[in-house]
Image (cartoon, rainbow, N blue to C red):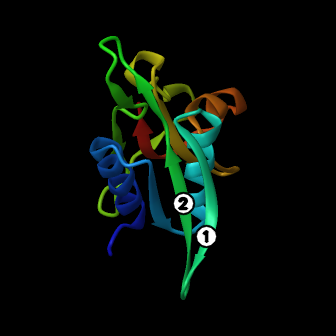
Amino acid sequence: MLDPISDMLTRIRNAARAGHPEVSIPLSKLKLKIIQILAEKKFIESFSEEPGGKHKWIKVVLRYIKDDSGRVVSYIQGIERVSREGRRIYVRKNKISKTKGGYGFSVISTSRGVMADDTARKAGLGGEIICRIW
């Protein structure tokens, strides 16, 4: 696997589109921090670390809501990788834009760790844009 973050985002996107209640993701510190941000922003219900053979896993419980017509839909409408292995995307502290007009957020890797775009804006930090979620 060349890009484990893209793999994690794809697992979440596919599980949300298929209507699965939960998804398992191989554990890493960066992935765990991104999942913690998703939980803080209420885009997922919960998460937990699970043992599983040689490697540990993160079990993510997805959040679903009812739309206007009464159908159950995923709270995560879109999730995309911005900075990739071959092309890193950096942003300055005063150039951090809102995602989908404020309905979503970006995850940014700063010198003080991984954080959501609004937290980075308040702290006056720029960095690498990892992904966008809306």
Provide residue 86's location: percent of width, then percent of height.
Answer: 29, 62
Q: Does residue 35 lie above or below 118 as drawn?
A: below
For mark 1, does the 10 Å Cα neighbourhood hold few (<14), some (14 to 19), or many (20 or more) residues? some
SS for callout 1: strand
Q: Nearer the viewer, residue 4 or 126?
A: 4
> Residue 33: which numbered mark, if any?
none
Image quadrant containing the C terminus: top left
Provide residue 3's location: percent of width, then percent of height.
Answer: 36, 67
**Residue at 49% in and 37% down:** 63
Q: Does residue 117 lie above or below 111 as drawn?
A: above
Residue 99 relative to residue 109: left or right: left
Provide residue 106's location: percent of width, then percent of height.
Answer: 48, 36
Q: Amino acid at mark 2?
A: Lys
Q: Amino acid at mark 1?
A: Glu
**Residue at 61% in and 28% down:** 118
Residue that protrudes farthest toward the top in the picture: 68
Provide residue 82's location: percent of width, then percent of height.
Answer: 35, 46
SS for callout 2: strand
Image quadrant containing the N terminus: bottom left
Tag 2 and tag 1, C-beta contact below 8 Å: yes
Residue 68 relative to residue 98: left or right: left
Label 2 – label 1 distance at C-alpha: 7 Å
Residue beneath disc 2: 59
Q: Nearer the viewer, residue 124 or 45?
A: 45
**Residue at 33% in and 35% down:** 78
Residue beneath disc 1: 50
Q: Does residue 115 appear anywhere in the picture?
A: no
Residue that protrudes farthest toward the bottom in the picture: 54
**Residue at 42% in and 45% down:** 131
